[in-house]
């Protein structure tokens, strides 16, 4: 049975792999800093290193909840403070730059979900972990967006919700990560089964996610129209089968246009994490 330490290590691995996948349109990778001027590849490495203990804590909280037969919604308050402390560690490591806030939320929630099954000594699958995560954060959108119309100072996520009704990563989590369940994981599994390298399989999986999910990072930086155009451009790469060169060209365009699909990058990390949870005993299945 998987341990909390192993779950935490897989979450760290997911963050390191996500930033390493190259090319990634508009995102930090091994080639460039994408559409960012305040961070680079090494910023992400420092940030990820600072978070390893946090993800073990998320998993351990879930383990305790499962062991004590808590309901899923009883586990969520246990992990919220861990998330707050994790963000502090991230900002301390990056001099105030937000590198992993979205991944702290999702990988933390999913680490707790995986830990919950471990606490009950149950086997886990990606689908079970996503479903339990959905149950853990049930009602989060209603709670977190309550009173947003009356607030004078809004976060980026609150502004996107207020203007467009898009709930972002909270809604994705509460719905059981459909962009990962229905798009990311099937794409990754297919590309790996077809014999692509891990890097290339994940690079193409990112394009699938971009083509199917409204990216709130793009909306907050630009607008909804730009986010929808990005989805169409990703669809075009897939339809034309333009390969890695098509992705490299899109990267050049996004850098010039200051477009960063950071939300899609977070979902790519989630996709990899869940895939690794399922095949952790046989590393050869993913390389």
Image (cartoon, helix red, strand yellow):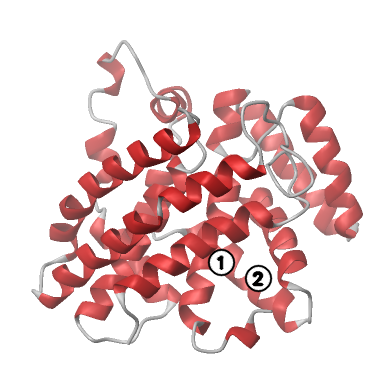
Pointer 2 residue: 188
* Badge 1 vs badge 2, beta-carbon distance below 8 Å: yes
Taking the spot 21% from the left edge, 45% from the top edge, the residue there is 81
Instruction: Answer yes or no: is residue 175 visible.
Output: no
In percent of width and height, residue 164 lies at 48, 28
Q: Is residue 23 left or right of residue 216?
A: right
In percent of width and height, residue 129 lies at 36, 71
Kind of element beneath mark 1: helix
Q: Is residue 274 above or below residue 232?
A: below
Observer-nearest residue: 236 or 17? 17
Observer-nearest residue: 97 or 223? 97
> How dense is the environment of label 1, judged by Cα within 10 Å: few (below 14), some, or many (20 and up)?
many
Among numbered discs 1 and 2, the one appearing first in the sequence: 2
Taking the spot 66% from the left edge, 44% from the top edge, the residue there is 41
Pointer 1 residue: 272
Q: Is residue 68 left or right of residue 100?
A: left
> How dense is the environment of label 2, judged by Cα within 10 Å: few (below 14), some, or many (20 and up)?
many
Kind of element beneath mark 2: helix
Instruction: Answer yes or no: is residue 138 visible.
Output: yes
In percent of width and height, residue 22 lies at 76, 54
Determine the image quadrant of residue 59: bottom left
């Amino acid at each position: 049975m998987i341990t909390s330490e192993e779950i935490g290590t897989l979450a760290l691995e997911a963050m390191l792999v996500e930033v390493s996948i190259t090319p990634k349109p508009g995102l930090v990778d091994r080639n460039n800093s994408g559409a960012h001027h305040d961070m680079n590849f090494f910023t992400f490495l420092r940030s990820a290193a600072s978070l390893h203990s946090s993800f073990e804590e998320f998993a351990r909280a879930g383990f305790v909840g499962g062991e004590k037969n808590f309901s899923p919604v009883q586990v969520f308050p246990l992990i919220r403070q861990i998330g707050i402390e994790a963000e502090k560690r991230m900002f301390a490591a990056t001099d105030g730059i937000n590198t992993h806030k979205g991944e702290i939320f999702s990988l933390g929630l999913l680490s707790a979900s995986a830990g919950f099954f471990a606490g009950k000594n149950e086997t886990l699958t990606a689908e079970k972990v996503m479903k339990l995560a959905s149950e853990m954060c049930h009602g989060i959108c209603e709670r977190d967006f309550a009173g947003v119309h009356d607030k004078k100072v809004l976060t980026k996520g609150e502004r996107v919700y207020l203007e467009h009704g898009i709930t972002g990563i909270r809604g994705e989590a509460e719905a059981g990560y459909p962009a990962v369940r229905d798009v990311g994981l099937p794409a990754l599994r297919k590309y790996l089964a077809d014999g692509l390298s891990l890097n290339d399989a994940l690079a193409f999986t990112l394009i699938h996610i971009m083509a199917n999910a409204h990216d709130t990072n793009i909306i907050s930086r630009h607008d909804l129209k730009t986010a929808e155009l990005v989805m169409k451009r990703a669809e075009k790469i897939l339809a034309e089968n333009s390969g890695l060169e098509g992705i490299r060209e899109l990267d050049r365009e996004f850098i010039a246009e200051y477009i960063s699909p950071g939300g899609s990058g977070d979902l790519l990390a989630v996709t990899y994490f869940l895939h690794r949870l399922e095949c952790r005993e046989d590393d050869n299945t993913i390389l």
